[in-house]
Image (cartoon, helix red, strand yellow):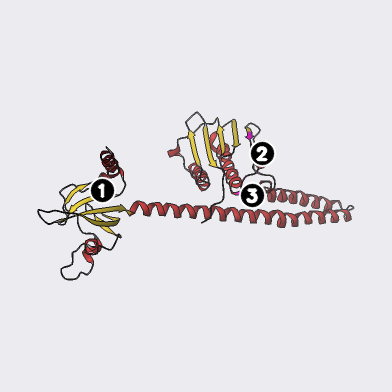
Amino acid sequence: MQSRLQNEYFQQIYEHIQDGIIIMKESREIIMMNPAAQHLTDWENGDFVPYCSYCMTRKKEQGEPTCYLIANNEVPSFLSEMPTYHGRKIDVEMSTAAIYANENTGETEYLLVLRDQETFKKAQEAAINKKMIRALIEAKESEHKRLAQELHDGVGQSLFSVSVAMQAIESFVQDNAQLNDYISEVRVELQKVMKDINAYSHQLRPHSLDQLGLEPTIQATIDGIKKNRPDLDIQLTTRGLDRCDPAVEINLYRITQEALHNIIKYAKATQVHIHIKKDNTHIYMTIQDNGVGFERDKVQNAGLGLKHMEERVDQLGGTCTIMSKLGQGTCIDIVIPRWRPQHD
């Protein structure tokens, strides 16, 4: 009974393991192979395993087998390129072992294991790309924070000082109506510039985000939009939302900023609902509008913004689901784990 169960387990492993397993004769004729090996190479039972690129080009001693692994039993594995049935070469990690000597022919049978390195390389490349994207986002946000601080504390304060100085000058020229009118015009322009500087500083990185947190900052953004778009009803509701990690706050704020920008520019919506919930394990955000909706594969500029949203959520280890149908609005669902900074 136990022997039968063990055989069944081994059969399951043989059928489902991702590594290619091949049993071949010393002549390299394939006796049997598992589905992974067949999928990887397109070989069939009875085919002959070709020599890898390394074995075909390496220098050999006289009488030494062409196969490097068979010639050097102490080598557990090595990397090379293996030709497939269709002539394509794949990067693989190979290992072999003598498992049976046929008493009738004296020929040794070998176990050959192939591990696909192309998939491994793609996974490595994806991980590197993810790190690069995260570094770029962090660098961008750091620069935004520096510029916002400079605009607010540097340029903004300097303009305020100019405004105070003009008030002082105005008190000395009360008898000169023409000059007084000119100074008033300059003060109006100066107020506009100061307002623009504050707006640019807020767009780069709101000071309230670092001082007060996500909810007050999003609400301030909504209040600012309502002044220009009183026809657009935007509601923000939260549950259990207190201060989060700074990386979470800035990324969720940027996502909200991008979503509202797209809604105002493209959606023709009259209602928007933003809901954020935080519990012991996750943070959930939903942004839903009643606009015209869209087809994802047909949008261009908005599509790039949606891609940036997904990248930001991915950096936080979360998921971003964007659902939209023509005439039925759009819903963006975001779920991220209670986040801790990643250290490389």
- Residue at image position (15%, 49%) is 46
Q: Which residue is mark 2?
A: 219
Please report whichever mark, 3 or 1, sits nearer to the chain's N-terminal start.
1
Three-letter residue code for mark 1: Ala
Q: Position of residue 340 (x, y in %)?
A: 57, 48
What is the magenta range?
236-246
Q: 333 or 317: which is nearer to us? A: 317
Viewed as shown, does residue 197 lie left or right of 251? right
Can see residue 268? no
Q: Could you tell me residue 217's position as x and y percent?
A: 66, 42
Q: Look at 62% across and 45% down and name the residue there.
A: 244
Which residue occupies the extreme left position in the image? 104
286 shown above or below 35: above
Secondary structure beneath label 3: loop
Identify the amino acid type marked 2. Answer: Gln
Q: Marks 2 and 1, Cα distance to the nearest angstrom?
A: 57 Å
Is residue 125 depicted above or below 244 in this figure?
below
Label 2 sits on a secondary structure element that is: helix
Front position among marks 2 and 1: 1
Name the residue tied to disc 1: 37
Would residue 291 be found to the left or right of residue 161 on screen?
left
C-alpha span from label 3 to label 2: 15 Å
Mark 3 closeness class: few <14, some 14–19, many ≥20 residues within 10 Å? many
Question: Is disc 1 placed on a helix, strand or loop?
Answer: helix
